[in-house]
Amino acid sequence: MVLPNKKQLVQHLSDKMTNQDIANIYGTSFQKIIQLIKKYQINSNELRKVNNYIVYEHWNKGEVVYVGSGVWYRCRRYTNRRNSEHRRLMQEGKLLYKIVAEFSIEEEARQYEANLIKKYKQIGQAKFNKQTS
């Protein structure tokens, strides 16, 4: 089993990956990832910018299927997805996650999200988003 080195771990954390996501890549437990974070003396909260709000996209087969916003781990959480197809694609690891913006103010993130949804809906994408006004 190959574990991430410090540089790889820093990159994964900067990409706002959860400890479980990182563990899945390397075929290990999230507890082992936590041990590595401590061993390398990495501040995961600082790298993940946990106090910021993100706007993110879910991609499948070259198209945006969902635009969302929220706290750093929100883009990878599938347990609260209303759409069963969206949830299934996430569970099966078939979506690409892309963080497109970060904001210190939640309302700014939500406005940016709404504008992106509108843009993608106009070209027939963001099929898992509800229509916005």
Image: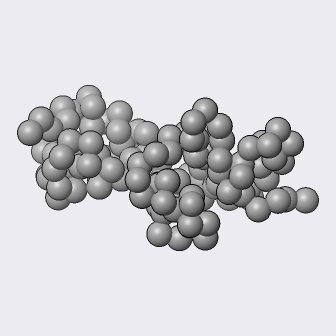
Q: Position of residue 70 (x, y in %)?
A: 60, 58
* 107 up-or-down from 125: above or below: below
- Judge from the rendering whether residue 3 lies leftward or rightward of residue 23; answer left or right: left
In percent of width and height, residue 34 lies at: 20, 54
Rendered residue at 86%/42% (across/down): 122
- Which residue extends farthest right? 133
Q: Quadrant of residue 14?
A: top left
| Residue 81 higher or lower than 55, as above or below | below
Residue 57 in the image, given as x and y percentages of width and height: 61, 44
| Figure quadrant of the C terminus | bottom right
Q: Could you tell me if residue 77 is visible in this image?
A: yes
The residue at the point 18 percent across, 46 percent down is 27
Q: Between 31 and 86, which is closer to the camera in this rendering?
A: 86
Q: Which residue is drawn at the image coordinates 35% and 39% (left, top)?
A: 12
Residue 73 makes an appearance in the image: no
Q: Residue at x 60, y 53 (%)?
A: 53
Above or below, 19 against 59 in this view is below
Frontmost residue, 1 versus 31: 1
Query: Which quarter of the image is occupied by the N terminus?
Result: top left
Residue 38, image x, y percentages: 17, 49
Colour style of the rendered protein structure: one colour
Q: Nearer the viewer, residue 105 or 77?
A: 77
